[in-house]
Amino acid sequence: MMRVLLFGASGFIGAHVRRELAATADLTCPSRDECDLVTAAPETLRALLDTVRPDAVVNCAGAVSGTAEDLVRANTLVTAKLVEAVAVAAPRARLVRLGSAAEYGPVPFGAAAAEDLPAAPVSAYGVSQAAATRLTELSAAAGRVDAVVLRVFNPVGPGMPRTTLLGRVAALLSRLAPGEDLRTGPLDAYRDFVDVRDVAAAVGRAVTVTAPRARVLNVASGRAVPVRDAVHLLVTAAGRPVRVREDHAPSPRSADVGWMRADVGRAASVLGWTPEHDLYDSVGALWSQAAPAAAPAR
């Protein structure tokens, strides 16, 4: 059984990754109190790697909001520290980090973003992720680490936090009475939603694949869906007849990107991975988990 050191195991994606790997790996999942990647000294990370002696290191931790400095510290600098620590203390371990579709920036309407598309992020979050991915690529190309970056598009599914649009909509639906207003920001953008359970499966493949022919891989459904459709699917799954009003401010992370769809051919070729869940399934699973905490509809 391989040994895997997993950071961020209590988060939305990390919890699913933990479940995915638990049956086949000996997992070590330090909490933030035990090892905060943002504040940990390089020697602390090296000592942890010396103790665990992992066959793979997976980082599902990171920040999606905050100041530019917060994002660079949590995403870019953490990656730099992990790359250095793995290169020194566990050079034979596979390093898997989660990137983001935000690294691409705007994509022409109707086009699919392939991994060789130049990164042109338009948010501090996207910049922090693109820089982290590039650092990982350079270290892998130099032979210092055996690394794979999974560029995760818009993950959706059970356990989705309220900091995400659909997670927030689910929380609101649990409190709204029939006929009340569900207030959101603009919903006319197109996004490539991927089930979080499929993301976890891709991480499992990335941990074990031998000699990957590429180091950066899109993890997505390969379909662009209007965000409005995803919200209405969730409203339908909840069975709550509410009015959706798009009168709030747009998300600063995605306001300048109206279309996003991934080319997922490389992940299929390199990892043998394809998504299994469609959006209807993902939204239904999200609501099924949120529903027990929901107040009865009035």
Image: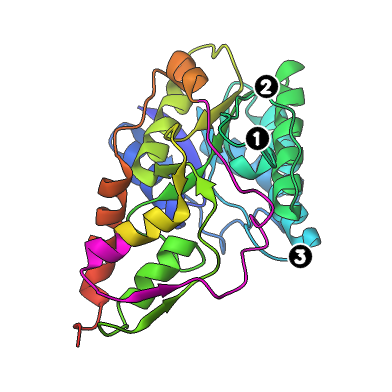
Q: Determine which residue is flagged by label 3.
A: 67
Residue at image position (61%, 53%) is 62
Q: Nearer the viewer, residue 73 or 94?
A: 73
Position of 157 with respect to 96 (left or right) is left
Which secondary structure, mark 3? loop
Callout 3 amino acid: Thr
Residue at image position (62%, 63%) is 251
The disc, 2 or 1, on the residue closer to the chain's N-terminal end is 1
| CA distance for labels 2 and 1 | 15 Å
Residues at circles 2 and 3 in contact by the CB criterion of under 8 Å? no
**What label sits on residue 116 in the rendered view?**
2
Q: For mark 2, does the 10 Å Cα neighbourhood hold few (<14), some (14 to 19), or many (20 or more) residues?
A: few
Q: Nearer the viewer, mark 2 or mark 1?
A: 1
Q: Determine which residue is flagged by label 1.
A: 108
Locate residue 70, reporting x and y percent: 75, 61
| CA distance for labels 2 and 3 | 28 Å
